[in-house]
Image (cartoon, rainbow, N blue to C red):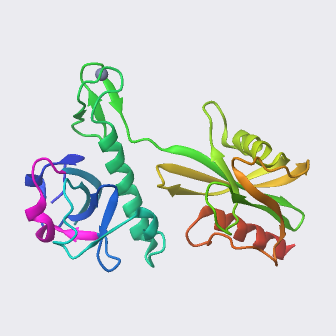
């Protein structure tokens, strides 16, 4: 059965639907499986359960469920963080759960109008929450970010974050500010974080990154001028690395940072 609305009530669910379950910002998982069927969860749903349509095709729909109580024991499941799903063998499940998690958070955070405080209501046909009093529409929101690998000849600049203590090195990154193009953000962030000027900023690829609700736009940028001076509140260490002596870096499979590093290594190899 196909669903007409984006916000559902338990009476509208069908046997062919699949469900991703959230309790207290964590996901119920059993043996790397994140999808549940109606039979398994029916007894735990009531009219106060938030049900948001995630995706739908001809045969089946996937629905994000925000539970009011922890039913993990009843389902022989574990409560996992979204981040732990990054390392599942099936990346599709991580992407699906990431989308679900962002919608559940958005829904939870927009119950009331930010202007007048009136309780929001569901839009009939769109995935939108509405304040009837102000005629305001609240759409799910993403925060665009840039992530960039700065390169110099056959070397790349990798940095250690001062916020996460680890021996991990990665690309520089930052949020796009209002009024900026992504390329302008690349120039600004590289200058702020390591005090370098870059040129030939080139878009490579993107990734949805649900920690929380970010869209990462990945670039390569060539070194132009300056000496590395890390901004200490953000960068613990930053330096040039040869492609054949890299530190611990993100995997190409799970992150756009890994993909940027892989792209550059390929390009150097073909020179
Ligand atoms: Zn309002």
The answer to whether residue 61 is seen in the rendering is yes
Residue 146 place in picture, x, y as percent: 64, 49
**In front of the other: 243 or 81:** 81
**Quarter holding residue 131:** top left
Relative to 125, residue 166 above or below: below
Q: Residue at position x 47%, y 55% from top?
A: 210
Q: Residue at position x 39%, y 42% from top?
A: 140
Ligand 1: quadrant of the figure: top left
Residue 20 place in picture, x, y as percent: 28, 63
The answer to whether residue 219 is seen in the rendering is no
Q: Is residue 63 magenta?
A: no
Q: Is residue 42 magenta?
A: yes
**In front of the other: 50 or 161:** 161
Identify the image quadrant of the C terminus. Answer: bottom right
Q: Residue at position x 64%, y 67% from top?
A: 166
Relative to 241, residue 10 above or below: above
Residue 93 place in picture, x, y as percent: 39, 69
Residue 7 place in picture, x, y as percent: 21, 46
Horizontally, is 134 left or right of 168 in the view?
left
Q: Which residues are magenta?
A: 35-49
Horizontally, is 76 left or right of 127 in the view?
left
Identify the image quadrant of the N terminus. Answer: bottom left
Relative to 23, residue 9 above or below: above
Q: Residue at position x 13%, y 49% from top?
A: 9
């Amino acid at each position: 059965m196909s669903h007409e609305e984006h916000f559902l009530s338990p009476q509208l669910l069908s046997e062919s639907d699949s469900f991703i379950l959230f309790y207290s910002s964590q996901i119920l998982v059993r043996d790397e499986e994140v999808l549940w069927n109606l039979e398994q969860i029916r007894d735990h749903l009531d009219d106060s359960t938030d049900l948001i349509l995630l995706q739908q095709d001809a045969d089946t729909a996937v629905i994000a469920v925000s539970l009011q109580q922890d039913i993990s024991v009843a389902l022989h499941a574990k409560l996992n963080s979204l981040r732990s799903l990054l390392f599942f063998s099936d990346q599709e499940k991580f992407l699906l759960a990431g989308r679900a998690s962002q919608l559940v958070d958005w829904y939870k955070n927009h119950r009331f109008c930010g202007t007048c405080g009136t309780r929001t209501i569901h839009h009939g046909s769109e995935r939108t929450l509405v304040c009837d009093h102000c005629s305001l529409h609240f759409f799910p929101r993403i925060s665009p970010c840039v992530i960039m690998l700065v390169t110099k000849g056959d070397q790349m600049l990798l940095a250690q974050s001062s916020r996460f203590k680890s021996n991990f090195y990665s690309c520089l990154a930052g949020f796009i500010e209002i009024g900026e193009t992504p390329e302008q953000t690349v120039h600004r962030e590289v200058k702020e974080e390591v005090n370098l000027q870059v040129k030939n900023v080139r878009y490579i690829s993107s990734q949805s990154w649900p920690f929380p609700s970010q869209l990462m736009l990945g670039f390569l940028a060539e070194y132009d001028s300056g000496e590395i001076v890390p901004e200490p509140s953000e960068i613990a260490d930053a330096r040039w690395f040869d492609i054949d002596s890299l530190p611990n870096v993100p995997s190409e499979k799970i992150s756009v940072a890994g993909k940027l590093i892989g792209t550059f290594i390929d390009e150097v190899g073909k020179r």
